[in-house]
Amino acid sequence: MADIPLRVISENSSSERRVTPSWSISQLKRKLEPVTGIPPSSQRISLKTPSNGTVAVEAADEDAAPLSDFPLSAYAELHIIDLRPVSARLNLNDTSGVEKYVMSAEEYEQKSDSVLAWKKAEKLGRFNPNAPSLEKAKIDGFNSEVKARGIEVGKRCRVGGDDSRRGEIKYVGEVKEIPGSIGAWVGVHLDEPVGKNDGSIGSTRYWGSESTLKHGVFVRPERIEVGEWPALDDLEDMEEI
């Protein structure tokens, strides 16, 4: 008989394996040990098929009983239960005692198949000979936006053309806590708690005092519209009841 593909399922593993029907139950258990980590003597095996339900794979003489005695079918499930006490089982999911390999920066620099090597070859990021001038152009562009839009600390504004996000400019400058950012950011204290922070990022406070309300937001200058934007009065348009 040809080999039959089965799904082998245990507490710590699940994989597809091909099983030869002429194997004895004992042979099967020995072959399952490196797959499941369970010793043959501690295995309880059941076969789950769509047409025959769940059948225990066991016999009085497991050395002589072939697997062909059981209703094997392609992609049926072999469930292997570990009969050992929990304290005696290997915890294959616990990696706390496994020594971690850490590559040194010097060794990584020497590798030819790394992301760093690819960036060097493609002249990307800091390896781009034009990077300093490109960075300066970005910074100059942000500074120009700040001047052109009349962005200054203390002025009223709205963010992104959204009337519900009106507030006061509290900070203009670099925000080093934002990954990969260069140039000017504008910190706004919104009238309503619809922002992202309370005026601080990480351990740096840019304005105000600590608050649980999220009135603070940092955006690029092109999203700021300076003007006499009064705080919205939610009760302004309510009819008398």
Image (spheres, rainbow, N blue to C red):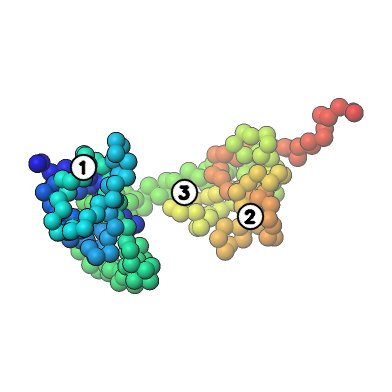
Residue under the point 33% across and 67% down: 84
Which residue in the protein does label 3 denote? 139
Residue 63 percent across, percent down from the top left: 14, 59
Task: Identify which amino acid the numbered label 2 is placed on.
Answer: Gly
Residue 2 percent across, percent down from the top left: 10, 41
| 2 vs 1, front mark | 1
Residue 203 percent across, percent down from the top left: 57, 64
Q: Is residue 126 above or below residue 6?
A: below
Asked whether residue 120 appears in the rendered view, the answer is no
Residue under the point 21% across and 42% down: 72
Q: Distance between the residues labelled 2 and 3?
A: 23 Å
Q: In which quarter of the image is the N terminus?
A: top left
Residue under the point 66% across and 57% down: 207
Badge 1 local density, few (<14 within 10 Å), some, or many (20+)? many
Which residue in the protein does label 1 denote? 72
Task: Identify which amino acid the numbered label 1 is placed on.
Answer: Leu
Residue at the extreme front: 60
| 3 vs 1, front mark | 1
Badge 3 local density, few (<14 within 10 Å), some, or many (20+)? some
Which residue in the protein does label 2 denote? 199
The answer to whether the residue labelled 2 contacts the one labelled 3, judged by CB atoms less than 8 Å apart, is no
